[in-house]
Image (cartoon, rainbow, N blue to C red):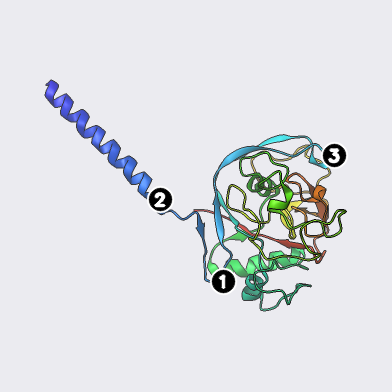
C-alpha cells in the first residue's frame, strides 16, 4: 500500500514538473513584441498590474490615486511614424515630412488619429485604439517612480527642450523614434519627441477618476495629451504631466501611439 502511495506521489510530481515545463515553454515562445502586418506598428505586451497615478507639481495631477489594470494589453513600441501613417492613410501631413519614414508623424489631430485607427483596424481585423490615460501613464512608468518615462535622467530618454534655456536635446525638431533609451517595458519616446493623444476627455484634476484603467469620459471638449514634445522644457515631459487640447488641434509637436486589447 505504501509503495502504491509512493508511486502515485512520484507520478503526481512528474506530472507537476511536466506542466511547469510546458508553461515555461509556452511563455518562452509567446512574443512580447509583435506586428499584425508588415507595415503595422510594433506592439509591446504590457502586463497587468497596479500603480499610483499622478504627481504633485500641478493641481491637475492630484489627488494621487491607485489604479489596478487587471488585464494585459498591447501598446505601440514607438509613436506612429510617418512611414506607418503613409502605409495606412496614403499621405503624410507632417511638418517635417522630408525627414524619413522613422520620424514620428505630427500635425495630426485627435480626430485624425481616430481615422488612422479605424483604417488600421479594418486592415488587420484587430481592434486598435488610443490608450486610456491611465494605461498611458502605467506603461510610461513601467513599474518605477521616475521623473520621466524610464529614467530620472531626462536626456537619456527624451528629445526635448528646443525652446528651453539651456537648450535640451532635440535640435529644434522631431527626431527618429527609438534612438533614446527604452523604459523597462521596452517602450521608446514616452517622454518627449511628440506629445501623444490619448482617448480620455480632459478633467481639471483626478477627483472621481476611474481606478481600473478605463477611459474617463466627460463633457469637456478637450482630449488629454501626454508625454511632452521636442519643443518643451523638462516640466512638460515629466511622467505625470498632463494637458488638454481640443480634438481638432493640429500641431508640429503632437502625434500619438496606438494600443489594443489582447485575446
Residue 222 showing in the rendered view: no
Residue marked by disc 2: 28
Q: Is residue 83 above or below residue 13?
A: below
Q: Give the SS element for disc 3.
A: helix
Q: Residue at x 73, y 49 (%)?
A: 154
Query: Which quadrant of the figure has residue 194?
Result: bottom right
Residue marked by disc 1: 39
Q: Label for residue 59?
A: 3
Left-right relation of 229 to 145: right
Q: Is residue 38 above or below residue 215?
A: below
Q: Nearer the viewer, residue 81 or 171?
A: 171
- Residue 69 position within the rendered picture, expressed as x and y whole percent measured from the top left: 60, 42
Residue extending furthest top? Answer: 2
Mark 3 and mark 2: Cα distance apart in space: 44 Å
Left-right relation of 22 to 33: left
Mark 2 and mark 1 in contact? Answer it, CB < 8 Å. Answer: no
Amino acid at each position: 500500500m505504501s509503495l502504491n502511495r509512493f508511486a502515485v506521489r512520484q507520478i503526481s510530481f512528474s506530472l507537476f514538473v511536466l506542466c511547469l515545463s510546458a508553461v515555461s515553454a509556452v511563455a518562452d515562445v509567446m512574443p512580447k513584441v509583435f506586428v499584425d502586418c508588415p507595415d503595422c506598428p510594433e506592439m509591446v505586451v504590457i502586463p497587468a498590474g497596479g500603480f499610483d497615478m499622478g504627481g504633485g507639481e500641478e493641481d491637475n495631477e492630484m489627488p494621487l490615486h491607485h489604479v489596478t489594470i487587471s488585464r494585459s494589453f498591447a501598446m505601440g513600441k514607438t509613436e506612429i511614424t510617418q512611414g506607418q501613417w503613409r502605409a495606412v492613410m496614403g499621405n503624410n501631413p507632417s511638418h517635417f515630412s522630408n525627414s524619413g519614414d522613422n520620424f514620428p508623424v505630427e500635425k495630426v489631430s485627435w480626430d485624425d488619429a481616430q481615422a488612422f485607427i479605424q483604417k488600421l483596424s479594418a486592415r488587420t481585423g484587430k481592434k486598435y485604439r488610443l490608450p486610456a490615460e491611465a494605461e498611458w501613464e502605467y506603461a510610461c512608468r513601467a513599474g518605477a517612480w521616475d521623473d520621466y518615462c524610464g529614467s530620472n535622467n531626462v536626456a537619456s530618454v527624451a528629445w526635448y527642450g528646443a525652446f528651453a534655456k539651456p537648450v535640451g536635446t532635440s535640435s529644434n525638431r522631431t527626431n527618429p523614434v527609438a534612438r533614446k533609451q527604452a523604459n523597462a517595458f521596452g517602450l521608446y519616446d514616452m517622454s518627449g519627441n511628440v506629445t501623444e493623444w490619448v482617448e480620455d476627455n480632459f478633467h481639471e484634476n483626478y477627483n472621481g477618476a476611474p481606478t481600473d484603467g478605463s477611459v474617463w469620459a466627460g463633457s469637456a471638449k478637450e482630449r488629454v495629451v501626454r508625454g511632452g514634445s521636442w519643443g518643451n522644457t523638462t516640466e512638460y515631459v515629466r511622467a505625470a504631466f498632463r494637458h488638454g487640447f481640443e480634438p481638432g488641434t493640429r500641431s508640429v509637436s503632437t502625434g500619438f501611439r496606438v494600443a489594443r486589447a489582447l485575446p
